[in-house]
Amino acid sequence: MINYKKTGFSVTVIAAAFLLQACQPSVPEYFKEVDVIATQQAAAQTQVATACNSSTLQWMIGQPEGVIGGVEIGGPVRVISYSQTVSTDYNATRTNFYLDTAGRITRVTCG
């Protein structure tokens, strides 16, 4: 035997769920635009942060300064000798090579 009261109740619950789903509030256009702008800015910052690729050049640590000229680097390069005075300007695409007193590379950074 089919209990018509329970069947009618479950049909009502399913119908109510579909109706409530249709009443979902939509996101205003302003928030959609802000989200797109924020996503674009985050992508640009990530691209700038990885522009100098210093992480791929860490193998050069301990090598002599002459190795720098033999490697193709896709941006500006700054070679900083031991105890050299350096400007504080920041360029995210520039690769910095720090040298010790013997002329060997001790650090490779961006900036």
Image (tube, grey):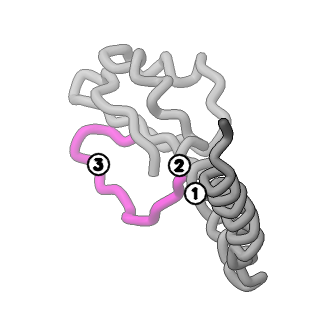
User: Cα distance, mark 1 to mark 3?
Assistant: 30 Å
Q: Earlier in the sequence, mark 2 or mark 3?
A: 2
Callout 2 touching callout 3 (CB < 8 Å): no
What amino acid type should be assigned to the residue bearing mark 1?
Answer: Gln
**Which residue corresponds to mark 3?**
84
Residue 110 lies left or right of residue 99; in this view the side is right
Classified by dominant secondary structure, the portion drawn in magenta counts as loop
Would you say residue 86 sits in the magenta stretch? yes
Residue 98 lies left or right of residue 96; in this view the side is left
What amino acid type should be assigned to the residue bearing mark 2?
Answer: Ala
Residue 3 lies left or right of residue 99; in this view the side is right
Q: Nearer the viewer, residue 25 or 107?
A: 25
Which labelled disc corresponds to residue 49? 2
Q: Which residues are magenta?
A: 80-92
Q: Give the image quarter of residue 103.
A: top left
Would you say residue 36 sits in the magenta stretch? no
Mark 1 or 3: in front is: 1
Residue located at (38% from left, 62% from top): 87
Quadrant (top left/top right/bottom left/bottom right) for the N terminus: top right
Which labelled disc corresponds to residue 45? 1
Residue located at (59% from left, 59% from top): 42
Residue 61, above or below 52 = above
Callout 2 touching callout 1 (CB < 8 Å): yes
